[in-house]
């Protein structure tokens, strides 16, 4: 009988990719959050399609996107401070329960046929407010579930894998459900899905985190977080590029119903397929990142993958064939997710433990908080110059920003290298050794 000699190698690769799953708390988080995120993506697809069906207006798509995301931009600094000063799991339990209630209200209004656009905008503001506290707490909570810091990059990659696996499954289900049963059923299933993550959080056995006891000095602590974040060049530059990408590039999601319906002449199934294509690319990105054994060398990927994302968007704007449009979105999804996950990993790795929540709040502002402004800008421009021209303009802006970032890579590596050595990611150089030995170290990051 012939045996496959590659099986041990395959098993080793799988073990490397999923090595963080050996931590019980992270397994619970992965399963619960994964189920909930499928519902979240179903709601996002149904929401966009419902708004465009009701209004037939790209501008209203931008308004709805703006209303649901602007609270994240406003409240994230405060949320990051709370994530540093309070029990992060408790914050997550509260935000998930509130998100479930929001989804139930949306489902009831839609299923009873009483939903109006102002309802969607108001509920979007509520959800944005909830997310502004949820995201910094959730991002910084990952560190508490992983015992060894060298596995942090893998945990963040698997977190992105979970997010994008849901992005692949959720839109596909939503497209079919909308066509058969309407948008309300997607909202209802999303509400039910929150039970999974609530149960998983309650089942965790989290070691109590040492929280620095300080006087409540809101303005001083916020100022400290701002000074720390933007006073250190690597953090400042990574967050700045992410802000440009979110403002000028990621708002393409808002215009996707326009391309599905008016450019590609499809229905909700086409919309779901396009969003699933983004998920395929993002899923491939997270598998690639999870398979890496070290975070050393990741910074080089930031400008490259941001440019790949932007180039894919520009090409997508000119496509009039469904299969080719889907392929281009796979490429864009890969570039965007790699850029975002790498930025997240580096920021969490180099941030001080007692300031990580505040750093991640600025990450949230750059990633999620700039999206509402981008959504509003994209909706306005699409009404004036068309959806395709809007994507091209955004893509070109992202490429220019990536080129400018690449000129600062050597500075970033120089400043981050000592931190990696301090926390053991790069071995310390033995005292007394000469320059030749130093040159044999792994590439700086």
Image (tube, helix red, strand yellow):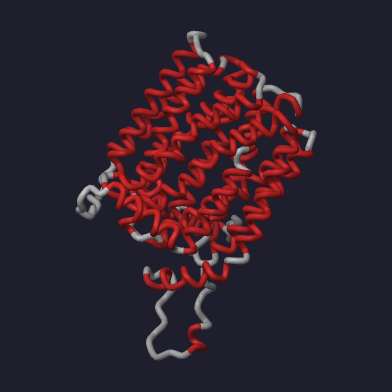
Q: For the point 46% across and 68% down, which residue is it?
A: 416
Count of labels shown?
0
Residue at point 41%, 23% (across, down): 102
Compared with 344, 170 (above or below) is above
> Quick one: which residue is furthest to the front in this view?
219
In the picture, residue 229 is in which quadrant? bottom left
Q: Is residue 218 left or right of residue 378?
A: left
Q: Quadrant of the N terminus?
A: bottom right
Q: Pinpoint residue 46: horizontal percent, then vertical percent.
A: 56, 23
Residue 163 place in picture, x, y as percent: 50, 41
Query: Which residue is at the front of the view, 383 or 49?
Result: 383
322 or 356: nearer the eye?
A: 356
At x 39%, y 59%, the residue is: 228
Residue displayed at 62% across by 66% down: 407
Q: Quadrant of residue 298?
A: bottom right
Would you place residue 107 above or below residue 397 in this image? Answer: above
Q: Is residue 265 above or below residue 278?
A: above
């Amino acid at each position: 009988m012939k045996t496959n000699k590659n099986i041990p190698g395959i098993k080793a690769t799988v073990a490397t990719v999923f090595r963080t799953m050996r931590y019980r708390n992270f397994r619970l988080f992965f399963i619960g959050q994964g189920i909930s995120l499928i519902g979240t993506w179903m709601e996002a697809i149904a929401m966009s399609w419902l708004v465009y069906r009701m209004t037939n207006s790209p501008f209203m798509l931008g308004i709805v996107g703006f209303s649901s995301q602007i609270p994240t931009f406003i409240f994230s600094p405060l949320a990051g401070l709370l994530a540093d000063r309070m029990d992060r799991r408790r914050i997550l339990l509260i935000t998930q329960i509130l998100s479930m209630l929001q989804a139930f209200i949306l489902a009831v209004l839609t299923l009873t046929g009483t939903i109006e656009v102002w309802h969607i905008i108001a509920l979007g503001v509520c959800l944005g407010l909830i997310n502004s506290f949820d995201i910094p707490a959730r991002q910084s909570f990952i560190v508490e579930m992983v015992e060894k810091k060298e596995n942090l990059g893998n945990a963040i990659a698997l977190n992105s894998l979970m997010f994008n696996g849901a992005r692949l499954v959720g839109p596909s289900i939503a497209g079919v459900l909308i066509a058969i049963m309407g948008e309300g059923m997607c909202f209802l299933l999303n509400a039910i899905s929150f039970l999974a993550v609530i149960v998983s959080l309650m089942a965790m056995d989290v070691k109590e985190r040492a929280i620095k006891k300080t006087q409540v000095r809101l303005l001083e602590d916020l100022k400290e977080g701002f000074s720390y974040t933007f006073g250190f060049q690597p953090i400042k530059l990574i967050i700045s590029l992410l802000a440009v990408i979110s403002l000028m590039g990621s708002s393409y999601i808002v215009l996707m119903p326009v391309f599905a319906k008016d450019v590609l002449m499809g229905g909700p199934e086409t919309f779901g397929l396009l969003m699933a294509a983004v998920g395929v690319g993002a899923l491939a990105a997270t598998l690639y990142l999870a398979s890496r054994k070290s975070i050393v060398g990741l910074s080089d990927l930031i400008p490259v993958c941001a440019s790949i994302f932007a180039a894919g968007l520009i090409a997508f704007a000119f496509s009039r064939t469904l299969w080719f449009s889907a392929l281009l979105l796979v490429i864009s999804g890969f570039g965007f997710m790699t850029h975002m996950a790498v930025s997240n990993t580096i920021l969490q790795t180099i941030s001080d433990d007692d300031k990580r929540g505040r750093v991640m709040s600025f990450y949230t502002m750059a990633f999620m908080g700039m999206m509402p402004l981008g959504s509003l800008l994209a909706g306005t421009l699409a009404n004036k110059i068309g959806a395709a021209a809007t994507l091209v303009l955004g893509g070109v802006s992202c490429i220019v920003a990536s080129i400018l970032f690449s000129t600062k890579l050597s500075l970033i590596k120089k400043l981050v290298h000592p931190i990696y050595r301090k926390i053991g990611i790069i071995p310390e150089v033995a005292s007394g050794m000469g320059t030749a030995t130093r040159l044999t170290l792994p590439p700086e990051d």
